[in-house]
Image: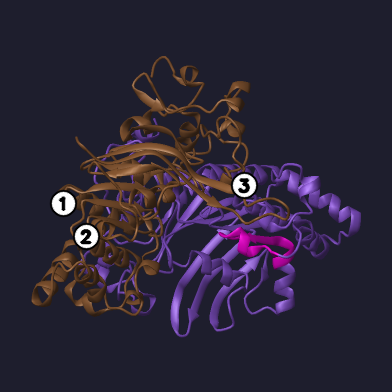
Chain colours: A brown, B purple
Amino acid sequence: MSVLLQAQGLVQQYATARSLFGKPGAVRAVDGIDLAVRQGEILGIVGESGSGKSTLGRMLLGLETPFAGQVRYRGQAMPAPGTAQWRGLRAQMQLIFQDPLAALDRRMTIRAQIAEPLEIHGLARGEALNRRVEELMARVGLRPDQADRYPHELSGGQRQRVVIARALATKPDFLVCDEPVSALDVSIQAQVVNLLRDLQEQERLTMVFISHDLKVVRNICDRVAVMYLGRVVEEAPSDQIFAAPRHPYTKALVSSVPRAGRGLESRIILQGEPPNPAARPPGCAFHPRCPMADARCAATVPRLENHHGRSAACLKLDRALEPAA
Amino acid sequence: MSFVSIRDLKVAFDDTQVLHGIDLDIDRGEAVGLVGESGCGKSVTWLAALGLLPAKARTSGSVRIEGAELIGAPAAMVEKIRGARIAMIFQDPSSSLNPVQRVGRQIGEALRLHRGLRGGAARHEAIRLLDMVGIPSAGTRIDLYPHEFSGGQCQRVMIAMALAGQPDLLIADEPTTALDATIQAQILDLLSRIRRETGMAMVFISHDLGAVSAVCDRAMVMYAGKIVEANSIDRLFAAPSHPYTRGLFEAIPDLDADRTRLVPIHGTVPDPRQLPAGCAFSPRCSRASDFCLGHRPDLKTQAEGGLVACFHPFPARSAKAQEAIFA
């Protein structure tokens, strides 16, 4: 599979408010990420809040200019936001958010919202525009009579379908879904996950799927990258990462997923607090919570390296590797 | 006599009935899960039972705490029982804490009201509670403000505050929903440890079947303002009988399975203003017959144990098949 999008050494940092005496500090939301998104795959990005996954998603789309590093789309460097070249790329890449009500304009009908990107990019007008809107609505499972409704008249699942229809309007090649089903109820979540899967297969979309819900990621993604404090700590095909996680953080994350019919046994309960990007620990960022960490982990930053065919960033990895695995 | 006994609890907002007669018993020390999707009435049940709904809500039925009736009782009496016996924690801890008061003072308030502790004794007890819920260096952090704690720690502070009154029943309404996976695991662990240590009963309200199964003995599934199935955790998860319960289980992706297609429940939850004439789940149910469209099923005791409100429930699996599931 050819590489559609390549991130090299991506760093994003934000200035914090100035403290009483000091200079403004810097918070590194993303701290050096190399990532390749291959044509036609669904790449999952998982991690807890503050791990930088949404910031990464926005940089992959070119919505934010990285502080350092670069994103290459089809081999070309991402143009600067606001330029004509950049605007041209917008039609090819789209973003789906978590909260569909916030992503939609409350005062516009469903038809007008789906038509808007087609008008902006000059892709259709008049009768062709109406036909295309109807086609898109049918594509995502909305009824034709819902075209003249307003967002508040639809259910959460239906609103997310509108957001998906609007994202698909310009026939994009690349889609970033940022927690697309997190706000939905379980029974509706399954409907939307299936829809995204069908669309990806039929339109041969390339997708980055950002989520904290490991079960959904397991179901939809081909490959998964686990983030911790702005870095990728492990990356592997979906089957492998959930069946045999290597990095101690991934292990804890996978074991912490509550499973129906199973009690609290066999769960790895991590000590300590979730990471704070404003106070990054030295060395391996995970070491204060890691059950295997020693003095070396507190001093050396582990690189994402290939360990027996698996990509992980851990100094302890050889010990972490069970002989049978 | 059970500790809490709810009979035919009904709630209506502006002539729209949202709760259609809930019967529920909770024994001392028991952990009961209440499962369902948004709008099914799982939170309203407890807000109504404890008299916490706004005045425009019309509540009827009976809620007895150790025989004392709460519905229709004078506010002062309800407050006394509620405050001394029952504590509640919510989904979003940061909005339940007062942002301009130190956490020690907030816990101290609960200690003063419910146990009459003041001054040094209250402070000492507040530190002990913070320590118990796993706040490191509680002795100094007692003087911090809520914004100086992370989300998981705020939930711990809320739990400490709830424990301050030494309640007999803790109602936890989606206590881990807003938290990250690894922190969620910590809080679930904390709740079940505290329950073991204090022997209090717990109602765990959640849409997360996995979390419910991790901390509860028994669970009830709600749909459109009614309980549709109730059983022990083991039996409920081994052999869900109601088509909605089964639908919920099948809709959740399995972490151990392949990338198989999910099995959603088609359609959406009905609008409480326009409930279907018969069984509320019938328009979405694969097993519904014409009879279901015209008649509402009652919650009935099943031969194999448990309660189900369905005319065509899935048959309970044989004991052998169940063993295979747990193997």
Instruction: Name the residue at 59% across, 64% down.
Output: B5
Residue B25 visible here: yes
Q: Can you identify the residue that label 1 sits on?
A: A203
Residue A291 coordinates in the image, percent (x, y): 58, 27
Label annotation for residue A168:
2
Instruction: Name the residue at 65% across, 46% down.
Output: B195
Quadrant (top left/top right/bottom left/bottom right) for the C terminus of chain B? top left
Q: Is residue A150 left or right of residue B39?
A: left
Q: Nearer the viewer, residue B181 or B132?
A: B181
Quadrant (top left/top right/bottom left/bottom right) for the N terminus of chain B? bottom right
Marks 2 and 1 in Cβ contact (< 8 Å): yes
Label annotation for residue B191:
3
Marks 3 and 2 in Cβ contact (< 8 Å): no
Q: How busy is the neighbourhood of tag 2: few (under 14 within 10 Å), some, or many (20 plus)?
A: many
Q: Nearer the viewer, residue B66 or B165?
A: B165
Mark 2 secondary-structure assignment: helix
